Image (tube, grey):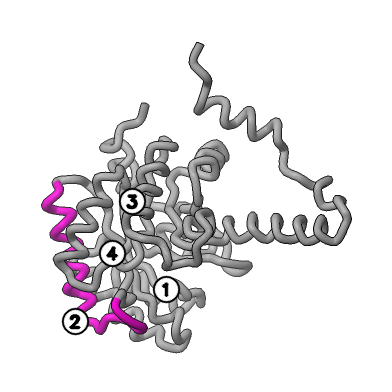
Amino acid sequence: MVTTAEKRARFRALHQKGCFVLPNPWDAGSARLLQHLGFEALASTSAGHAWSIGKPDYATSRDEVLAHLTQLCASTDLPVNADFASGFADDPEEMAANISRAIATGIAGLSIEDTKISGPGLHDKASAVSRIKAARGAIDASGEDVLLVGRAEILLHDRARVSEAIDKLVAFADAGADCLYAPGLNKRDDIRALVNAVSPKPVNILMWGPGLTVAELADLGVRRISIGGSLASIGWGAVMRAAEEIRAGRFDALAVGGPSQSLNDIFSGYSRPSA
């Protein structure tokens, strides 16, 4: 049995050199499958989790996410990085209290966005930095080795604001973020600029379709790569297409179903009925 402390130490070590992929499971089964396939760490996905309980992204409550994180961490020997959205509060102190609750789930890292909870838009740099400082304080006060990821969401609103995103992430690094992340950053020169701007702190890049390879991102200095809700979206897309065909009166899509016996074999190593 791998302890939480061991997971956290392993997770931090992964950020020291090289480049690793951090796939995003949405439940215990997908987490165990990804562990079986040989990945070294995992990250939760707010969208994938929301869809799994019949909600749209960003509609899950703090307590639903905490319960989900607890389940993910208990289901795998791999370290788990939490997609903790905006910390479920705009106020830094309230957000810090929520981060303390997240740490208790067993996570090895968590990301905090600069998206506002109270209304549309993003926190300005000063407000976002104060929130990163509060997050850093909550982690330090816990005495736990949990990695803090600062996320700037600017590029999801306007892909042209690269310099603004980098400027914000530099401020997050100075405020105590361990890893920096701007979803939507996908051009070589922009990625290289961010890596150089926050060095030696590691950078996370989101890949949600064809583009740069792992080797190419590693050459740019990227430490870790995540894929958000992409795997969950692929799964839901396959179910939707098959169900639509069944609704139309045909069952051909069922011929390309998943390997049931292989899944049973994989999961049998995690759960065996008692005598």
Q: Which mark is residue 192?
A: 1
Task: Check disc 4 and report its element: helix, strand or loop.
Answer: loop
Given the image, on which type of amino acid does mark 3 rest? Leu
Q: Residue at x 23, y 73 (%)?
A: 90
Q: CA distance from mark 1 to mark 3?
A: 35 Å
Q: Which residue is mark 4?
A: 87
Q: CA distance from mark 4 to mark 2?
A: 17 Å
In the image, 194 versus 164, the foreground residue is: 164
Magenta region: 118-142
Contact between labelled residues 3 and 1, with CB atoms less than 8 Å apart: no
Q: Which residue is mark 2?
A: 126
Given the image, on which type of amino acid does mark 2 rest? Ala
Q: Position of residue 19 (x, y in %)?
A: 44, 54
Task: Check disc 2 and report its element: helix, strand or loop.
Answer: helix
| Residue 70 position (above or below residue 240) | above
Task: Check disc 1 and report its element: helix, strand or loop.
Answer: helix
Q: CA distance from mark 2 to mark 1?
A: 25 Å
Q: Residue at x 23, y 76 (%)?
A: 128
Badge 2, how many Cα within 10 Å: few under 14, some, many 20+? few
Given the image, on which type of amino acid does mark 4 rest? Gly
Q: CA distance from mark 1 to mark 4?
A: 29 Å
Query: Would you identify the image quadrant in which residue 33 lies?
Result: top right
Kindly report which numbered mark, 1 or 3, lies closer to the viewer in this rendering: 3
In the rendered structure, the answer to whether residue 91 lies left or right of residue 250 reads: left
Upstream in sequence: badge 3 or badge 4: 3
Q: Which mark is residue 66?
A: 3
